[in-house]
DNA sequence: TATTGTTATACTCTATAACTATA
DNA sequence: TATAGTTATAGAGTATAACAATA
């Protein structure tokens, strides 16, 4: 929906060929790469399994799937959201039987949020559908181009985690 | 803020080296690439010039910068938003003197929305800051790695536009 | 007394429906 | 009568402040 990152125009719009040249100005590369990344990310984000689930809800499910059971506070910190907002999100997810909230065994104040089987299935289904869209595109590339993307993916992960 | 796309765990978590191998399974590559793209996109999206401006507002400015003056209806269609929502967004942008609304010369019903000099500066500033973040990261790469990202960017643009 | 989670309330962004002005 | 834009009103999602229960 949002085009906030879709700044297509660039200062010097050179030919968009695949050929890598020797003298790559990082600033020019950055402008090109940003547009390409944002656009691809938006396309991928649009592909989700359960359209009735908000991004935030989907995100909580993904985090729980990756980390295992967490408390409200931990989830709120993870999502950079205030605890009352997370309470609301979790209430919605619990109502849809995607998570359960059980008392923390050691600390009576806390509640442990756990992914249900349905919640786990939703995470996997979303992932599968998003990957399916991208896989179809990758299938149409040359092996050489896929190799480039494989290397780029590793480099991008390093950059994003820096 | 949203971690919805941050699904780090993958079915077969192989070594994350940069080496491109010959037999790249598109499905495995897709899972890797998606995580890398989403994460990098989120980092870049966080870098904007005016933090008081919402994504939707920033997006309208970017569209106007790219296309020139548009009407309310055209902007609403472009942003996949209903006209009343765009009215509200534009009222906010006009109040901050980032756009002006002038009567359409030919059709008295329409209003032409035009970017002001401040609006244009905001677009350029945002772009510059986002690119600056990425440029710093790219500066630390080998020329060879930058070449890979340059090729990957072109391929990703093709995929996103498909 | 400090912390976890919740409720109460308000603000932002978006939507639909109804209204005004122009074609 | 149809279209562009606006106003009125409602529904998500998130925030802060105040409250209850537990450490």
Image (cartoon, coloured by chain):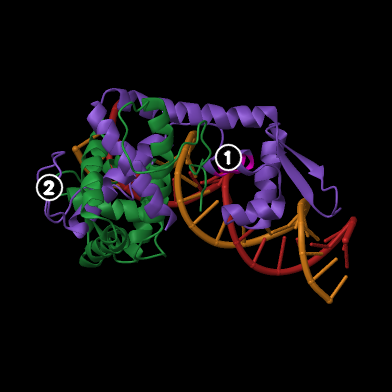
Chain colours: A green, B purple, C red, D orange
Q: For residue B143, what is the image quadrant?
A: top left
Residue at label 2? B21
Q: Which residue is drawn at the image coordinates 40% and 44% (left, top)?
A: A36
Q: Earlier in the sequence, mark 2 or mark 1?
A: 2
In depth, the one of B89 and A67 nearer the eye is: B89
Labelled pair 2, 1 in contact (Cβ < 8 Å): no
Using the image, determine if residue A94 lies above or below residue B144: below
Q: Which residues are magenta?
A: B56-64
Q: Is residue B45 magenta?
A: no
Q: B115 left or right of A94?
A: right
Q: B128 left or right of A97?
A: right
Q: For residue B140, what is the image quadrant?
A: top left
Q: Which residue is drawn at the image coordinates 22% and 50% (left, top)?
A: A144
Q: For residue A38, what is the image quadrant?
A: top left
Residue at label 1? B62
Residue A96, horizontal then vertical, whole percent: 34, 66
Residue D17, horizontal then vertical, whole percent: 49, 34
Measured Cα–Cα span from mark 2 to mark 1:
40 Å
Using the image, determine if residue B148 lies above or below residue A46: above
Is any atom of residue A80 visible in this view? no
Q: A143 left or right of A19?
A: left
Q: Residues within 10 Å of mark 2 (few under 14, many from 20)?
A: few
Q: Main secondary structure of the magenta part?
A: helix
Q: Which residue is drawn at the image coordinates 43% and 33% (left, top)?
A: A31
């Amino acid at each position: 929906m949002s085009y906030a990152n879709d700044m297509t125009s660039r200062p010097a719009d050179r030919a968009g060929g695949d050929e890598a040249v020797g003298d790559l100005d990082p600033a020019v590369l950055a402008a090109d790469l940003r547009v390409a990344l944002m656009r691809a990310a938006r396309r991928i984000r649009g592909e989700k399994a359960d359209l009735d689930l908000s991004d935030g809800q989907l995100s909580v499910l993904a985090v729980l799937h990756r980390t295992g059971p967490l408390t409200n506070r931990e989830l709120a910190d993870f999502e950079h959201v205030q605890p009352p907002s997370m309470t609301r999100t979790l209430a919605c997810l619990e109502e849809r039987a995607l998570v359960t909230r059980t008392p923390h065994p050691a600390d009576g104040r806390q509640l442990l949020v756990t992914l249900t089987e349905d919640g786990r299935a939703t995470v996997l289904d979303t992932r599968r559908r998003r990957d399916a869209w991208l896989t179809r595109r990758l299938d149409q590339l040359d092996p050489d181009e896929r190799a480039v993307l494989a290397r780029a993916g590793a480099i991008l992960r390093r950059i994003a985690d820096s």
